[in-house]
């Protein structure tokens, strides 16, 4: 979008917050870059430059505005809508892959050469993977400086910087303040947060309907791994350097996020997973405008606009849970999953609540005795086959996965049919166009609206909802009187 100067100019002059994260506005006279919605008096059009990413603006020599904090704007919805190389790379960068594995590791995960990855990212985003990772490190550093009492040296290494000097230089360059000045400017009153505990605000594009989002997560929550406590959805997180516990609470203009981490190096990855879980980088205006063009769906959209797709923090975990939940009730699926967690999950301490385990990895489940599973023999075989495929990397699921390739590999596994493949694509892979025409709830809702109820006819009708069919499913599900559609009681 940043190449459409007229459109960017109109959005910036209107201070339209819907475009925050889509592009960034840099001012050549002040050398500052902002969100399109920055509340300060706008510059002259001839002094504006538009960039596709914060990293590109920083690389061009602009520093972040202290008023609108553009580095903290919602992420571009493109990276969740698309499945091409650039989108997959951006999801992996957000998950911290470049900091942990370098650019060669990023390229290896994508199946391309480092040169190809560099070239495509620079062509579309104006910055390579190292610059994008550097911008993310700066954002992580600012969060830790402002929301924790950690010493600056600890923050530097937790944010992924190789040295104190690189940390100081980057913070000064990006924010025009030293780390100490940034902390003082935050004016955090009272005692600093306890080590490992952070309180953050996760922004989103309005509107957001939290009912089905939190209702779904809580109704399907696995005891010991997830819970609803004090008006917040809480769950354990398995992270690259350790583990964490997160509490997410919906507020009118943000999601309140409380994170407890065993290793602060996991902060950026944990935030990325929480945003992905709640689909916070979606563009609800674009989704709802298209779905409203169907007169049968329009009343559902108007009734509760801004529905998101509840996703997952761990794709392998969700895939296992999807197979466990085949052809059984929500309560039965929770019971079966809880047994797996108790027998094979890693125990953790949770002083603030009742969480007890991390969900077991595919490797931990690889030696699972099928006879220990209280489910039909065919579903046991399906689950064991999936676990083996995940543990051996014959099926690779995650933020950097190729959606079509993952679907093809899942389809090859015995017992995994179209419904399971599509629900994994929708919630674990994040495909916004995944569709469930054979789902009972979808078919029942379609029939109630006068839409075709047979899978083939409904799929043909749903072509008008593309590329947002996963969101259409949320609106269809919402017609049912099921706990997944209601915000839990505080």
Image (spheres, helix red, strand yellow):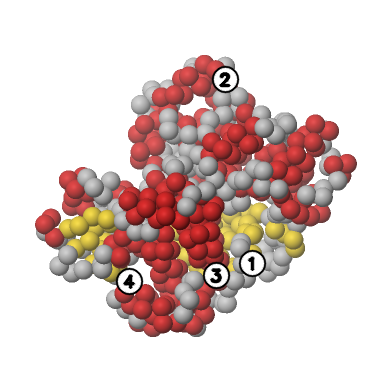
Q: Could you say where residue 186 lies in the image, as x and y percent from the top left? A: 38, 76
Residue contact at pointers 4 and 1, CB within 8 angstroms: no
Q: Which residue is mark 4?
A: 174
Rate crowding at label 3 as few (under 14), some (14 to 19) or many (20 or more) other CA atoms within 10 Å. Answer: many
Q: Secondary structure at mark 3?
A: helix
- Using the numbered discs, state the Cα–Cα distance from disc 3 to disc 2 in whole angstroms: 46 Å
Mark before the other along the chain sequence, 3 or 4: 4
Q: Which residue is mark 1?
A: 242
Residue 181 vertical position relative to residue 330 in the rendered view, above or below: below
Which disc number belongs to residue 344? none
Q: Quadrant of residue 227?
A: bottom right
Q: Which residue is mark 2?
A: 455
**Residue at 18% of width from left, 69% of height from top?**
30
Q: Is residue 335 left or right of residue 399?
A: right
Q: Which residue is mark 3?
A: 265
Residue 304 vertical position relative to residue 270 in the rendered view, above or below: above
Q: Secondary structure at mark 2?
A: helix
Mark before the other along the chain sequence, 4 or 1: 4
* Residue farthest along the right direction in this orientation: 371
Q: Quadrant of residue 423?
A: top right
Mark before the other along the chain sequence, 3 or 1: 1
């Amino acid at each position: 979008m940043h190449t459409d100067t007229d459109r960017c100019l109109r959005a910036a002059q209107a201070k339209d917050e819907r475009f925050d994260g889509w592009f960034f506005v840099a001012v050549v006279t002040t050398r500052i870059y902002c969100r399109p919605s920055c509340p300060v008096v706008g510059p002259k059009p001839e002094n504006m430059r538009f960039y596709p990413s914060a990293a590109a603006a920083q690389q061009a020599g602009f520093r972040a505005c202290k008023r609108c904090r553009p580095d903290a704007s919602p992420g571009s919805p493109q990276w969740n809508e698309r499945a091409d190389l650039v989108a997959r790379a951006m999801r992996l960068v957000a998950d911290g892959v470049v900091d942990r594995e370098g650019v060669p590791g990023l390229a290896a995960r994508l199946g391309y050469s480092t040169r190809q990855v560099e070239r495509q990212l620079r062509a579309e985003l104006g910055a390579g993977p190292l610059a994008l990772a550097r911008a993310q490190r700066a954002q992580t550093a600012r969060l830790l400086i402002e929301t924790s009492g950690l010493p600056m040296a600890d923050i530097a290494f937790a944010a992924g910087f190789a040295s104190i000097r690189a940390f100081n230089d980057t913070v000064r360059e990006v924010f025009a303040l030293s780390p100490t000045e940034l902390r003082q400017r935050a004016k955090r009153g009272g005692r600093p947060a306890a080590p490992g505990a952070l309180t953050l605000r996760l922004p989103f594009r309005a509107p957001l309907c939290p009912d089905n989002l939190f209702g779904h997560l809580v109704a399907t929550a696995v005891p010991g791994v997830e819970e609803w406590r004090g008006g917040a959805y809480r769950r354990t997180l398995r992270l690259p350097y350790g583990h964490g516990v997160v509490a997410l609470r919906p507020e009118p203009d943000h999601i309140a996020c409380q994170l407890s981490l065993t290793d602060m190096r996991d902060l950026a990855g944990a935030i990325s997973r929480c945003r992905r879980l709640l689909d916070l980088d979606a563009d609800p205006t674009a989704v709802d405008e298209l779905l409203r063009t169907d007169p049968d769906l329009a009343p559902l959209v108007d009734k509760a606009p801004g529905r998101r797709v509840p996703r997952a923090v761990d794709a392998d975990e969700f895939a296992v849970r999807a197979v466990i939940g085949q052809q059984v009730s929500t309560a039965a699926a929770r019971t079966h999953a809880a047994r797996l967690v108790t027998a094979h999950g890693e125990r953790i301490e949770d002083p603030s609540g009742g969480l007890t385990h991390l969900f077991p990895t595919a490797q931990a489940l690889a030696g699972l005795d099928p006879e220990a599973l209280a489910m039909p023999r065919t579903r046991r075989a399906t689950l064991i086959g999936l676990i083996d495929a995940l543990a051996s990397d014959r099926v690779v699921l995650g933020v950097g996965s190729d959606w079509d390739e993952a679907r093809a590999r899942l389809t090859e596994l015995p017992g995994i049919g179209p419904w399971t493949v599509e629900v994994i694509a929708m919630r674990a892979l994040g495909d916004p166009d995944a569709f469930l025409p054979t789902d009972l709830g979808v078919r029942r809702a379609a029939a109630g609206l006068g839409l075709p109820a047979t899978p083939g006819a409904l799929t043909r009708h749903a072509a008008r909802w593309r590329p947002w069919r996963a969101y259409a499913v949320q609106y269809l599900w919402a017609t049912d009187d099921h706990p997944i559609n209601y915000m839990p009681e505080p």
